[in-house]
Image (cartoon, grey):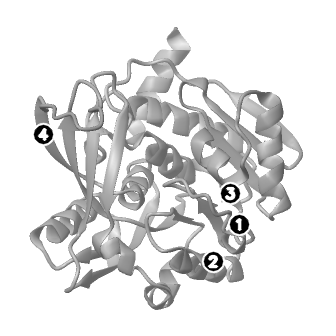
């Protein structure tokens, strides 16, 4: 069965600045290369879901500019339903400036632009896209009020809600957590929300307990090279990562979320298998530059999985 995934989230144009290392305060450095790519956490997750076979709908906003039209065209080219993407005449399309270091790590500066105008009113107009989905995904690059409205509608229709609490926030957003079925932060984001620094299995379990106590059914914490941890229905497990040479970690987490949603059963009964598939997809993402260009399709993920089985 094809999963139906609706993503409420951000649309950004990424400018990737290739540098040797981050500048020190007061230091001026040269970049070796500048690349332009489609991105935004929401858009990345939608593309990942679509390329892994999900029937995907996007709810968001662009500016009245050429970059917004470009982003809309790129999403539509992935067969993503963009009829719920609003155009704001008074805003620019979201921008992300990615400082990509030689070792593959990145630091990102974001101008929200039209993403900040995503509202509960826009969500209300998109009620059909929410009610007809199997999964609704959102992040923190659009206003939390819109996320609460979307999750409220989804829950009322029995739709599974997935929260990627990124960028990291120091606010627990308990109203949103109560409406969240699956939360998927990385270890830094988890620490910002819970106040618990993740160092071992004990602190992973404590972090999961924090979210469970606030109503979240399934907790997934991604750990980069250390794999991913989940806690659900009394079961906890640490799944290993797939070892690859990272070129650019941009969109790795987004790929994980979108690919997982494309494979996950609404009753969450195949959570470990869906997470393994998502980890394989993310392992492919980090081996290429950019966001959209690096997100793999199902065939590539399956081929990678087969190669792992031969090792």
Q: Nearer the viewer, residue 171 or 75?
A: 171
Q: How many marks?
A: 4
CA gap, disc 2 and disc 1: 14 Å
Residue 61: x and y, percent? 32, 76
SS at mark 3 in the image: strand
Numbered badge on residue 182:
3
**Nearest to viewer (mark 2 / mark 4):** 4
Q: Which residue is mark 4?
A: 34
CA gap, disc 3 and disc 4: 36 Å
CA gap, disc 1 and disc 4: 38 Å
Q: Earlier in the sequence, mark 1 or mark 4?
A: 4
Q: Earlier in the sequence, mark 2 or mark 4?
A: 4
Is 252 situated left or right of 273 in this image? left
CA gap, disc 2 and disc 4: 40 Å
Q: Kindly identify the residue that appears in the image at 75 percent across and 70 percent down.
A: 178
Q: Kindly identify the residue that appears in the image at 31 percent across and 25 percent down.
A: 247
Q: Quadrant of residue 239?
A: top right
Q: Earlier in the sequence, mark 3 or mark 2?
A: 2
Q: Residues within 10 Å of mark 2 (few under 14, many from 20)?
A: many
Residue 88 sits above or below residue 112 on the image = below
Residue 68 in sight: yes
Residue 83: x and y, percent? 32, 80
Residue 296 in sight: no
Q: Kindly identify the residue that appears in the image at 41 percent across and 61 percent down.
A: 42
Q: Quadrant of residue 244?
A: top left
Residue 137 sits above or below residue 207 on the image = below
Q: Which residue is mark 2?
A: 154
- Mark 1 in CB contact with mark 4 (< 8 angstroms): no
Q: Which residue is mark 1?
A: 177
């Amino acid at each position: 069965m094809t999963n139906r995934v609706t993503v409420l989230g951000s649309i950004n144009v990424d400018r990737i600045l290739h540098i040797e290392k981050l500048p020190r305060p007061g230091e001026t450095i040269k970049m070796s290369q500048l690349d332009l790519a489609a991105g935004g956490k929401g858009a990345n997750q939608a593309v990942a879901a679509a390329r892994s076979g999900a029937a995907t709908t996007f709810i968001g906003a662009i500016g009245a500019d050429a970059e917004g039209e470009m982003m809309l065209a790129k999403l539509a080219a992935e067969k993503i339903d963009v009829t719920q993407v609003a155009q704001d005449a008074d805003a620019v399309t979201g921008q992300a400036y990615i400082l990509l270091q030689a070792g593959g790590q990145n630091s990102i500066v974001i101008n929200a632009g039209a993403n900040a105008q995503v509202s509960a009113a826009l969500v209300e107009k998109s009620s059909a896209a929410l009610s007809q989905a199997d999964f609704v995904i959102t992040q923190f690059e659009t206003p939390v009020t819109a996320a609460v409205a979307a999750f409220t509608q989804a829950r009322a229709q029995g739709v599974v809600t997935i929260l990627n609490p990124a960028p990291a926030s120091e606010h627990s957003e308990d109203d949103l957590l109560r409406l969240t079925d699956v939360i998927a932060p990385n270890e830094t984001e988890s620490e910002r929300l819970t106040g618990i620094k993740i160092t071992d299995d004990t602190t992973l379990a404590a972090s999961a307990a924090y979210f469970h106590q606030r109503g979240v059914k399934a907790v997934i914490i991604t750990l980069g090279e250390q794999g991913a941890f989940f806690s659900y229905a009394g079961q906890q497990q640490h799944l290993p990562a797939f070892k690859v040479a990272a070129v650019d970690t941009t969109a790795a987490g987004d790929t994980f979320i979108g690919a997982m949603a494309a494979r996950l059963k609404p009753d969450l009964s195949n959570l470990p298998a869906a997470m393994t598939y998502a980890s394989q997809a993310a392992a492919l993402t980090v081996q290429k530059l950019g966001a959209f260009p690096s997100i793999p399709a199902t065939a590539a993920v399956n081929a990678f999985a087969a190669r792992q089985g031969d090792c």
